[in-house]
Each structure stands twice: as C-alpha cells, then as structure tokens.
Image (cartoon, rainbow, N blue to C red):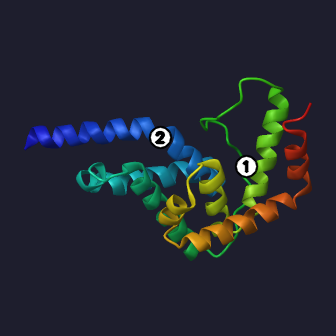
Amino acid sequence: MGDRKQGGNEEFQSFMVGRWPRLMRTAFLLTGEQHAAEDLVQSTLERVYVSWRKVGSADDPEAYVRRVMINLHARKHRRRLKEFLAPKDDSGLAHEVADTGDRIAQADDRSTLLGALAQLPVRQREAVVLRYWEDLTETQTAEAMGCSVGTVKSNAAKGIAKLRAIPGLAETVMHGGRK
C-alpha cells in the first residue's frame, strides 16, 4: 500500500513539474496577474492532488487539470462581478520568446497583447486563450470551459473581433513583430 502511494506521489510530482510552465502561462493569461496566476495554479494542483489516482488514470490528465483550473477561475469571477485589470507585471513568468528579432519590440508586442486580453470579458478571454494561445480544438475548449462547442465559437469570435478593433494590437499584427 505504501509503495503504491509513494508511486502516486512521484507520478503527481512528475506531472506537476512537467506541466508547471504551461499551467502558469495559461493561468497568467486568464488572470492577468502573476500572483493571481500562481494562486490559481496552486489551488488547482491542490484539488487535483487529492484525487490524483482518478486524475492520473484519466485518458487525458492535462485536460482534466485544465478543466479544474477553468472552473476555479470562473467560480472566483462569478463572485467578483468586475472586469479584469490589465496585467501590472509579468516578471518571473516562463516566457515563450521567438529565437530571432528585436527583443524590445517583442516585449512591447507582448505587453500590448496582454493589455488587449485584459479588456475582454471573462468567457471571451477564456475562449481566446484556450483556442488560440493553448491551441486546443473547439471540442477540447468546450470541455475545459464546461460549455457547448457553439458557445466556444461564439465567445472566441466575439473576443477576436474585439481584439481586432484595438488599434495598438492591430498594428502589432499587421507589422508581424515590427521591422
């Protein structure tokens, strides 16, 4: 019995360490703040650890964990009826930076994108982040958000339309990271 529990702990730890950067990135994009993202990931992993035997044996443990994260995030924002604030600081976050190009322009582009995402309503932000940043299918996104595929399509389309209407973001996309 002790060996099985030890094996489960090691499996959970391996999962957590391997997925931490991706979970942090997703949480940061959802919350807009480094500390809120850390809290969200930690709360998610606390809940997942308690039922790790069930989660670890699921067909797609990462999808299960993502769903827990989305549910925790949505629950928090249902209680607090205010829009997200623009991210104040993303230092310390595991960044995905292209190998070539102007680093200052990339930082400006990232800041512009994060500010634009912060302007979206919660469900649109979730749909856009999961579909286009995390590159999930519509079905996977619907499962993570606990809604229908049609709702995902609608929220993602509305979110993308709002993002396209933001002048600074449109310029960033048009110039492809600036020349």
Q: Is residue 164 left or right of residue 7?
A: right
Task: Indicate the position of residue 52 as horizontal and vertical percent values.
Answer: 27, 51
Residue lying furthest top: 100
99, 68: nearer the viewer = 99
Q: What's the mark number on residue 88?
A: 1
The three-letter code of the residue at mark 1 reads Lys
Residue at 59%, 55% in the rendered image: 130
Q: What's the mark number on residue 20?
A: 2
Quadrant assignment, res 24: top right
Q: Tag 1, which secondary structure? A: loop
Q: Tag 2, which secondary structure? A: helix
Number of callouts: 2
Residue at 50%, 52% in the rendered image: 39
Quadrant assignment, res 81: bottom right
Residue at 73%, 59% in the rendered image: 118
Residue at 73%, 49% in the rendered image: 88
**Among the two numbered marks 2 and 1 on one chain, the one whose residue lies closer to the N terminus:** 2
Q: What's the mark number on residue 160?
A: none
Task: Indicate the position of residue 179 as horizontal and vertical percent values.
Answer: 92, 30
The three-letter code of the residue at mark 2 reads Trp
* Label 2 close to label 1 by CB (< 8 Å): no
Q: Quadrant of the N terminus?
A: top left
Q: Residues within 10 Å of mark 1 (few under 14, many from 20)?
A: few
